[in-house]
Image: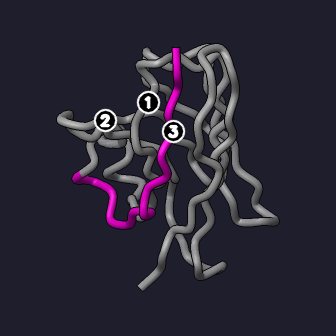
Amino acid sequence: QVQLVESGGGLVQAGGSLRLSCAPSIPTFYTYAMGWFRQAPGKEREFVASITWRNGVKNYADSVKGRFTISRDGAQNTVYLQMNVLKPEDTAAYYCAAGISRDTYSGGNYYPRNWDNWGQGTQVTVSS
């Protein structure tokens, strides 16, 4: 069973930046894409961003467009989420996701149920 290992969360003031990273425990693990979701207390898990592994096509939630950037490093088999101009409403546990097929991804990448593999979550807290 592959594990997704996340790092990079923490506490930051509003306007600050953080970078999250995520790598599968099995380097040869195949997934059509990888993504990031977040979940605040009392709320459902929501889509943040995703990227196709081969072509690097990116998708973002409207709430993070222009502030967050998802990227991948094929050599390191790692996906990153660069978060700039952080706001208190970005406070949440952030989860890395993988294990989605090409057929499911198109139009389905926004839904947590379509992803098979999840990281343990890393907390991001933005103070005002």
Res. 16 image quadrant? top right
Q: Is residue 78 magenta?
A: no
The numbered mark, 3 or 1, whose residue comes first in the sequence reads 1
Q: Which residue is at 40% across, 36% downward?
A: 92
Residue corresponding to mark 3: 124
Q: Is residue 102 left or right of residue 11?
A: left
Q: Which amino acid does label 2 sit on?
A: Ala
Res. 119 image quadrant? bottom left
The answer to whether the residues at label 3 and label 2 have Cβ atoms under 8 Å apart is no
Q: Distance of mark 3 from mark 1, alpha carbons?
A: 5 Å
The answer to whether the residues at label 3 and label 1 have Cβ atoms under 8 Å apart is yes
Tell me where residue 114 appears, x and y as whole percent: 27, 53
The numbered mark, 3 or 2, whose residue comes first in the sequence reads 2
Tell me where residue 70 appears, x and y as whole percent: 63, 37
In the image, is residue 72 above or below residue 19? below
Residue corresponding to mark 1: 91
Whether residue 101 is visible, yes or no, is yes
The answer to whether the residues at label 1 and label 2 have Cβ atoms under 8 Å apart is yes
The part of the chain drawn in magenta is: 113-128
